[in-house]
Image (tube, rainbow, N blue to C red):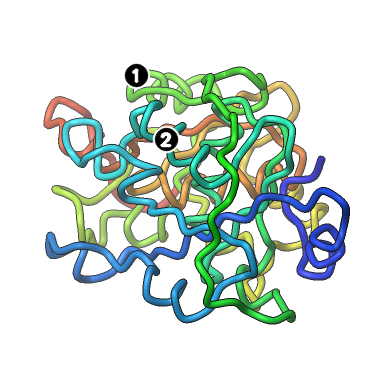
Amino acid sequence: MTAIISGSELASDLAGQTPPVLLDVRWQLSAAKAAGEPAFDGRAEYAAGHLPGAVFVDLDAELAGPPGADGRHPLPDLDVFGEAMRAAGVSADRDVVVYDGGQGWAAARAWWLLRWTGHPSVRVLDGGLAAWSGELSTCTPAPEPGDFVPKPGATGETGSVDADGAAALARSGLLLDARAAERYRGDVEPIDRVGGHIPGAVSAPTTENVGPDGRFLPREQLAERFRSLGAVEGTEVGVYCGSGVSGAHEILALAVAGIPAVLYPGSWSQWSADESRPVATGPDPQ
């Protein structure tokens, strides 16, 4: 099972006898969010047109818990997440395809959560909604409830670490920082308390994992990129970002490259809020 699917492959799957469950997770972190106002969540865009049969999923309410000590997008309550997935028609024995408006971050967050909690078959539409050439629908579907019950770690292929685990990875393995390089260096910090990065982490902006069309680079090119950053055989790899959303996109890119990795969900929003945690600034030592 690959982690991503093309628009043409999805069209073929949807025409099959058992089409996949479709989840629309259009969302973006906006300047309004940085100012403490609600983030754009894609509901209006979903209502204006979505893949036929797709169910809208609210990232802030269903794929994350309330902001607080664990970060801006902490892991969701599993009961809330499971209920949302079942209401969307997600079952353990049926494929799931997730998409967003094109950036891929929100879709990757849903993909990671489903894989982390044990769903065996989840893919992200590579390139997002723009990769779909078929008709769109304005009808809100009413799917049959699914039976998926989240069980973290059930697949053994994805995992998570806390702040201490992230610090340990930065020392003994490879901890990738998926944010923009200027935030890693501490040149700017538009959202969190202080700029910089976790000491020992390596800068690896997830925006460099895709081409101009928003689709992932070829598997071999991604694998070479991560090898050059230190993701060699035998090295445990972890990823963090600002709040565990774009970091999930980097985990997805690593999966495309065939490299397992764990996510630090609290990410910089949790780390930087704790004044006892050390902060490094400046360019990547690599």
Q: Height in image: 102 above or below 81? A: below
Sequence-wise first label, 2 or 1? 2
Q: Is residue 187 left or right of residue 254?
A: left
The residue carrying pointer 1 sits among few (fewer than 14), some (14 to 19) or many (20 or more) residues within 10 Å by Cα, namely few
Viewer-nearest of labels 2 and 1?
A: 2
Image-quadrant location for residue 198: top left
- The spot of residue 97 in percent (x, y) is 67, 52
Residue 32 is labelled as: none
Q: Height in image: 123 above or below 190? A: above
Image-quadrant location for residue 16: bottom right
Q: Secondary structure at mark 1?
A: helix
Q: Which residue is mark 2?
A: 81
Q: Is residue 259 left or right of residue 77?
A: right
- Nearest the eye: 169 or 10: 10
Q: Which residue is mark 1?
A: 164
- The spot of residue 52 in percent (x, y) is 64, 69
Question: Looking at the image, which residue is at 67% across and 46% down?
Answer: 96
- The spot of residue 133 in percent (x, y) is 74, 81
Question: From this viewpoint, is residue 286 visible?
Answer: no
- Nearest the eye: 10 or 181: 10
Q: CA distance from mark 2 to mark 1?
A: 25 Å
Q: Height in image: 136 above or below 175? A: below
Question: Looking at the image, which residue is at 54% across and 24% down?
Answer: 149
Q: Secondary structure at mark 2?
A: helix
Image-quadrant location for residue 58: bottom left
The residue carrying pointer 2 sits among few (fewer than 14), some (14 to 19) or many (20 or more) residues within 10 Å by Cα, namely many
Q: Is residue 51 left or right of residue 285?
A: right
Question: Looking at the image, which residue is at 28% across and 37% down?
Answer: 65
Question: Looking at the image, which residue is at 78% across and 53% down?
Answer: 19
Quadrant (top left, top right, bottom left, bottom right) of the N terminus = top right
The amino acid on which the numbered mark 2 sits, given as a three-letter code, is Phe
The amino acid on which the numbered mark 1 sits, given as a three-letter code, is Asp
